[in-house]
Amino acid sequence: MISHAAATVVLSAVSSLVQAPSRPQPDAPIKCSSCEEWNQPRDAFKVFGNTYYVGVAGVSSVLIASDDGLILVDGALPQSVPLIDAAIRSLGFETEDIKLILNGHAHYDHAGGINSLQRFTGARVATGSAAVRSLTQGMPSPGDPQAGYGDGFPPIANVEGVADGDVLRVGELAITAHATPGHTPGGTTWSWSSCEEAHCLDIVYADSVSAVSAPGFRFTGDATHPSIIDSFRRSITTVSELPCDIMIGAHPFVGDLDGKLEQRKQHPDGSNPFIDPGACRALAGDAMRSLDARIAEETAK
Ligand SMILES: [Zn+2]
């Protein structure tokens, strides 16, 4: 016969199991000069149709919803995970329903939260083939222009590689990978269609296409690696040519997310400011000009 005290212990263990809040456990926070500012909370909002912004103030995460499950694009910083989880729940969805997590590029500010989110959801994680090793090791690829900084992030256990043009599905959702290397070797831009009744739009999650590097790296190549200029230019052209009614950048300042939000607040009955068919071309134009400036700087030396 079980004693009263033992029964109480068993009961309280059972009830704590039942009541235990099921939330993703974040990995240790990453410290960086912008991390605190980036990781400020931001209210989640619908961008269009089944596409929602669930990221933090300075780093994007996007949710694509269906009755068959959710897709999450990018996991921001490790310390962003509780905020992303809360953002998803504030929209009435369950983080547990994420079936697929995609990554734009293998840097700590976009891949840092993915390990925790994968542990919690058991979701598939996919990224460009050239970034798989980087994600599973939690380090930038050796060919990454910013590898010299050595900024790691929590390694992710199971990662699938995708090729340019691959389509990944969760139920009725379909999302297409576009290889956009340059900022990193495995950089991948993602596109899908979202509808409001019969009105369907092409949405692009534009991965970073900025020519940023650690000191000493040359985009024009040197004794340690060949030039990556041609593939970088092709990536920027890819972004400019994508069907793109709405563009969401890997950081919200790309494409002026805050300006569009403010405009929507000022004119709640107006047209959706996120519908901006020139946004991908504008991003590509800026990226090409800054890459050209970088090349000029390298050749002048
Ligand atoms: Zn980056």
Image (spheres, rainbow, N blue to C red):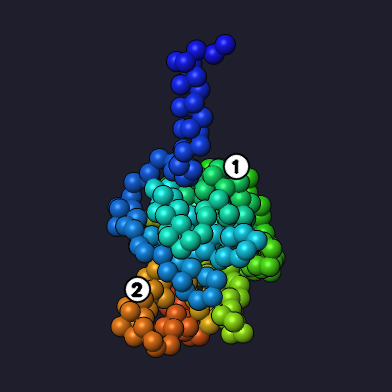
68 left or right, relative to 108: right
* Residue 173, image quadrant: bottom right
Name the residue beneath numbered marker 1.
157
267 left or right, relative to 289: left
Q: Quadrant of the image for the C terminus?
A: bottom left
Q: Is mark 2 within 8 Å of ligand 1?
A: no
Q: Quadrant of the image for the N terminus?
A: top right
Q: Of the residues shown, which amino acid type is indicated by label 2?
A: Asp
Q: Nearer the viewer, residue 125 or 266?
A: 266
230 left or right, relative to 299: right
Q: Of the residues shown, which amino acid type is indicated by label 1?
A: Ala
- Look at 62% across and 63% down and name the residue there: 67
- Look at 50% across and 19% down and name the residue there: 7
Residue 112, horizontal then vertical, whole percent: 46, 49
- Mark 2: few, some, or many residues within 10 Å (few <14, many ≥20)? few
Name the residue beneath numbered marker 2.
258
Q: Nearer the viewer, residue 176 or 291?
A: 176
